[in-house]
Amino acid sequence: MSKEILDEITKIHTPEDVMKFFDDFIEYGCIDVCEKRWVDSLGGHDFRDIYRTLSLEDSLDNKIGACFEQANISKFVLDTIGIKNRIFCTRGFNEEHKEPTDLYLVHCYVLGYWGDKIINIEHSDSDKRGIYVYDLFEDAIRETHNIFSDKFKLHGASTTRCDEFFDFSWRINLC
């Protein structure tokens, strides 16, 4: 991991600083199984075959990540500056994808405990980019899940669920 990135993380003190870090250093996209870089995309029509997750180090070194990697980076940043946080994934399924292993759509995000507020710093979804502030954890998880559940249903998901995420395995295909 570059010294530049680590130095920038030490300058973070507010949710706005976290967003600025992402704006300045992390592009939305991925590096596929063939090492091709996709910016503002996950690999086009074949993304389910070519997308794979990146390690934290690979994401930061390449300054790129989809929601999975950006949640991993957020967790690292918040852990580094001492902000308690939890990671969640809203997942959508359609009629052909009914089992938890048959992932159809996914969005990962981090909820941070900033003072007496719960914060979601959404960077990876450009339509929803922003800092969302909640008084209660239950409101944060419900409202964030509902945002992406509604979006997934517009894209054909018939059911959605939200799960807390604990393990960041890398070089796996989430699709």
Image: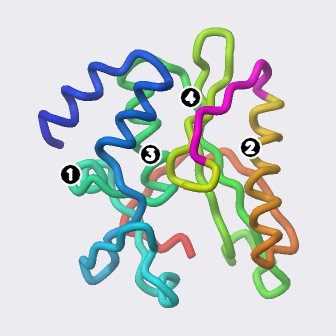
Could you classify mark 1 by the number of other residues whose Cα lies within 10 Å: few (under 14), some (14-19), or many (20 or more)?
some
- Residue in the image at 67% along x and 10% along y: 116
Of callouts 2 and 3, the N-terminal one: 3
Amino acid under label 1? Answer: Asp
- Amino acid under disc 2: Thr
For marks 2 and 4 on the same chain, the one whose residue lies earlier in the sequence: 4
Residue that label 2 marks: 144
* Lateral position of residue 30 relative to residue 157, left or right: left
State the residue at coordinates (63%, 27%): 119
Q: Quadrant of residue 161?
A: bottom right
Relative horizontal placement of residue 171, taking residue 57 as reference (left or right): right
Q: Position of residue 33 (x, y in %)?
A: 32, 80
Q: CA distance from mark 1 to mark 4?
A: 23 Å
Residue at which label 4 appears? 85
Mark 1 and mark 3 lie on one chain; the one further toward the N terminus is 1
**Which residues lie in the magenta part?**
129-137
Foreground label between 2 and 3: 2
Q: CA distance from mark 1 to mark 3?
A: 14 Å
**Disc number lying in front (2 or 4):** 2
Q: Label 2 to label 1, Cα distance in Å?
A: 29 Å
Query: Callout 4, which amino acid?
Result: Asn
Residue identifier under label 3: 72
For marks 1 and 4 on the same chain, the one whose residue lies earlier in the sequence: 1
Q: Is residue 136 magenta?
A: yes
* Residue holding disc 1: 61
- Nearer to us in this view, 151 or 136: 151
Q: Amino acid at mark 3?
A: Asn
